């Protein structure tokens, strides 16, 4: 139930596509014809992160290919960074004031997380620098190290019957996986999917502070779920505390941070739509849930009117929550959306981000005009 995000996204998407079928759609009161997306770039390998740059450009990661691409306003693509570390993942792309921020994660393993989780900055004139290595910081600080995950309060006899591949009870381990960045207010806010935390990094000194550790995601085990996962009868009705796995962070119109969360463990209709969006106070660290019942939320973006758009990877849709609301409605049906960015009334998204087995990369960057008002 605890795993590196790279392998989890791939495996869980295959489960959703091959075994479970399409997720049921949610009713929407949106009127008029469906918006029609325009394809700007195609043939991309796992484009899990996206940011809008200057001059109509976009920056998009090829996470499992270890590269960062620039897409110009005419759809031309160029590689602006290629990792020299075999097997490294590049992602967590953001842009501010002529600088692209991104991560280089390497050495991911099921037990030790990333041995490198570098936060990088690339200026438009090509100057590259490493701001800090968050894997090293995580090994020293481990913000969720005192949080218990798994079955709390389960007696030893029952706990001994839990299959070894499912952690019965454990504290947060040293694990850093930088999945999203957000520059602003003199800091770079980071969603660390491995560390289950939101961090803030000084872009000049590299100093790091913990903004918040997200709360575990509770799931009450049903008899059906226990059978599906090979769990003993003694856990039926008990709560399992999953890791929260933050996947994106954005400033809301109210000045709070909004954070999407992809719960650890099985993600899909088999356990219900368990994804969440939280607000996080960037200074006090107070966390509150504002949206629930999402199926694989991997990215969020606010429009100028305050509407919140959400990429639901395993629901094959981009959803929208009206400002002040808490219910997500379908905005656009697209295959496997992963990353969102909004600029000048246009929503940009990456779609079809995970190639089928033995198939060439087929990820896309698409754009769609947002409604003038909602």
Image (cartoon, grey):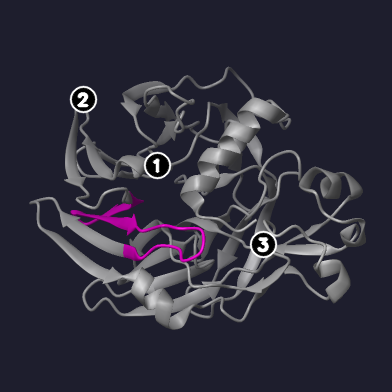
Question: Residue at the spot x=36%, y=22% of the render?
Answer: 39
Q: What percent of the width, then of the height, locates residue 33? A: 58, 17
Disc 3 is placed on an element classified as strand
Disc 2 is placed on an element classified as loop
Which quarter of the rendered picture does the C terminus lie within?
top right
Q: Residue 52: name its quadrant.
A: top left
Is 6 magenta? The answer is no
Q: Are marks 2 and 1 in contact (CB under 8 Å)?
A: no
Judge by depth and name the residue closer to the eye, 352 or 176. 176
Q: Residues within 10 Å of mark 3 (few under 14, many from 20)?
A: some
Mark before the other along the chain sequence, 2 or 1: 2
Residue 342's disc number: 1
Q: What's the CA distance linking mark 2 and mark 3?
A: 40 Å
Mark before the other along the chain sequence, 1 or 3: 3
Relative placement, left or right, of 153 versus 57 is right
Q: What's the CA distance linking mark 1 and mark 3?
A: 23 Å
Residue 74's disc number: 2
Question: Residue at the spot x=77%, y=47% of the render?
Answer: 229
Relative vertical location of residue 224 with respect to residue 72 in this rendering, above or below: below
Read off the residue under disc 3: 289
Q: Residue 237: name its quadrant.
A: bottom right
- Does the rendering let one see residue 154? no
Region of the chain picked out in magenta, as a range: 90-117
Q: What's the CA distance linking mark 2 and mark 1?
A: 17 Å
């Amino acid at each position: 139930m605890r795993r590196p995000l790279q392998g989890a996204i791939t495996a869980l998407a295959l489960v959703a596509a091959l075994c479970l079928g399409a997720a049921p759609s949610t009713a929407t009161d949106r009127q008029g014809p469906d918006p029609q997306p325009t394809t700007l770039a195609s043939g991309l390998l796992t484009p899990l992160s996206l940011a809008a740059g200057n001059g109509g450009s976009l920056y998009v990661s090829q996470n499992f290919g270890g590269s960062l691409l620039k897409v110009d306003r005419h759809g031309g693509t160029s590689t602006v960074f290629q990792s020299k570390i075999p097997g490294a993942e590049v992602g967590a792309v953001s842009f501010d004031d002529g600088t692209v921020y991104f991560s280089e994660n390497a050495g991911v393993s099921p037990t030790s997380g990333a041995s490198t989780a570098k936060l990088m900055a690339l200026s438009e004139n090509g100057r590259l620098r490493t701001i800090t290595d968050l894997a090293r910081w995580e090994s020293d600080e481990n913000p969720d190290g005192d949080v218990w995950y798994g079955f709390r309060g389960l007696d030893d006899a029952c706990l001994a019957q839990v299959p070894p591949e499912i952690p019965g009870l454990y504290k947060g381990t040293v694990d850093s996986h930088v999945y999203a960045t957000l520059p602003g207010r003199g800091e770079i806010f980071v969603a660390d999917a491995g560390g289950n935390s939101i961090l803030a990094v000084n872009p000049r000194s590299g100093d790091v502070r913990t903004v918040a550790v997200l709360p575990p995601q509770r799931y009450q085990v049903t008899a059906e779920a226990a059978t599906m996962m090979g769990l003993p009868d003694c856990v039926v009705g008990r709560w399992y505390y999953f890791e929260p796995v933050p996947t994106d962070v954005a400033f809301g119109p109210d000045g709070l941070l909004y954070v999407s969360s992809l719960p650890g463990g099985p993600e899909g209709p088999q356990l219900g739509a368990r994804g969440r969006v939280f607000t996080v106070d960037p200074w006090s660290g107070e966390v509150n849930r504002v949206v629930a019942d999402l199926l694989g939320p991997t990215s969020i973006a606010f429009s100028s009117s305050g509407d919140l758009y959400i990429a639901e990877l395993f629901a094959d849709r981009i959803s929208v929550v009206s400002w002040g609301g808490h219910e997500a409605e379908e905005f656009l049906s697209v295959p496997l959306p992963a990353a969102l960015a909004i600029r000048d009334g246009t929503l940009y998204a990456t779609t079809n981000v995970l190639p089928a087995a033995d198939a060439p990369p087929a990820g896309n960057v698409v754009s769609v005009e947002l409604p003038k008002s909602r």
